[in-house]
Amino acid sequence: MELTGNKPILPVSVVIPCYKCKQTILRAIRSIVNQTTEPSEVVLVEDCSNDGTLEYLEGLRKHFPPDWIKVLPLTTNTGPGYARNAGWETATQPYVAFLDADDAWHPEKLQIQYDWMCNNPQAMLVGHASIQLKRDDAHLVRTDGVLVKRISRLQLLLSNARGGFAIRTAMLHRNLPIRFDPSKRYMEDYWWLLIVVFSNYKIYKISLPLAYTFKADWGERGLSGRLWEMEKEELDNYWRLQRMGLIARPVALIFTIFSLLKFFRRVIISATRRHIFRQ
């Protein structure tokens, strides 16, 4: 696995939070190397794993041209929000793209997203659809019909997954002033999207599934125990918006009820998945 040196270089910094990711980070890096256009740099933020991850990343860095991969070690475990902020501050390029250490990208992801942002300078932030794969095999899709829609406040409130997009798909202007809340360990990405939208920045979603995850976002093995923590943080997001005067109290109450209904549905699905895994 190496850079070819004959691909166009995009003014994009890729930021990846890394926590105990020795088993998956190579797949993520490979999906960056396999892009039809290469980013200018990759920033790996090592979130104090204390399991050899830092040494692994340093070894990986040496296989690429100097300064293409930058390893940023944190001295304490801070969570993905703080880690993304740290990588964002380290990034040198005018555009930043986020990827998670256990996910991967479609080979044309950067080119499609960057071209669209250049042609639509009013867009501060653009994401896209993603899909779950069971194996590492690439799931290639046709990319000759890009459908893009603007995400409204209501769409994002109704569903952070369907209405919005996962952070592993996001590309943004580096000068976007709104950062992740480092105090939130769960749903920090949803809070960030909400604040961006409620701050009147225009964000968009490309319909193409240009990113892959290899586990369910919730309800699968170790994720099941985090369901209630995630739910509490989602409810906190709504009531923080209410306290900031961005939504009315009755609206916050409606979305609280709606969120709790979704939560109980997820509990049922999670229990079903655990039963399937035991078989």
Image (tube, grey):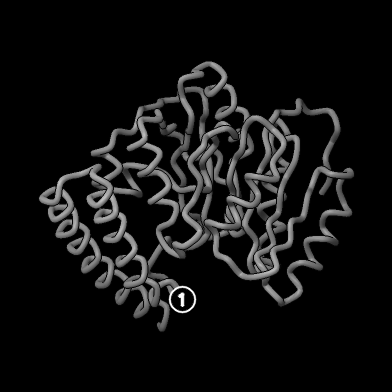
> Which residue occupies 88% across, 43% down?
65
- Helix, strand or loop at label 1? It is helix
Question: Percent position (x, y) of residue 137?
Answer: 60, 52
The vertical placement of 33 against 221, above or below, is: above
- Of all residues shown, which one is farthest toward the top? 119
Relative depth, front residue between 230 and 128: 230
Three-letter amino acid code of the residue under disc 1? Gly
Q: Is residue 2 left or right of residue 193?
A: right
Residue located farthest toward the front when viewing the structure as drawn:
244
Q: Quadrant of residue 136?
A: bottom right
Looking at the image, which is closer to me, 219 or 125? 125
- Tally the numbered discs: 1
Q: Position of residue 134 (x, y in %)?
A: 51, 60
**Image coordinates for residue 181, horizontal then vertical, percent:** 47, 54
Label 1 Cα neighbours within 10 Å, binned few <14 / some 14-19 / many ≥20: few
Which residue is outermost to the left?
250
Q: Quadrant of the C terminus?
A: bottom left
Give the vertical position of 52 relative to 74 (above or below).
below
Q: Mark 1 sits on what residue?
A: 222
Q: Residue at x 58, y 50 (%)?
A: 85
Answer with left or right where residue 246 lies relative to residue 42: left
Name which residue lies at 39% across and 65% down.
Answer: 218
The residue lying at 47 percent from left, 62 percent from top is 183
Q: Position of residue 189 (x, y in %)?
A: 44, 52
Q: Quadrant of residue 239?
A: bottom left
Q: Compared to 72, does 194 lie above or below?
A: above
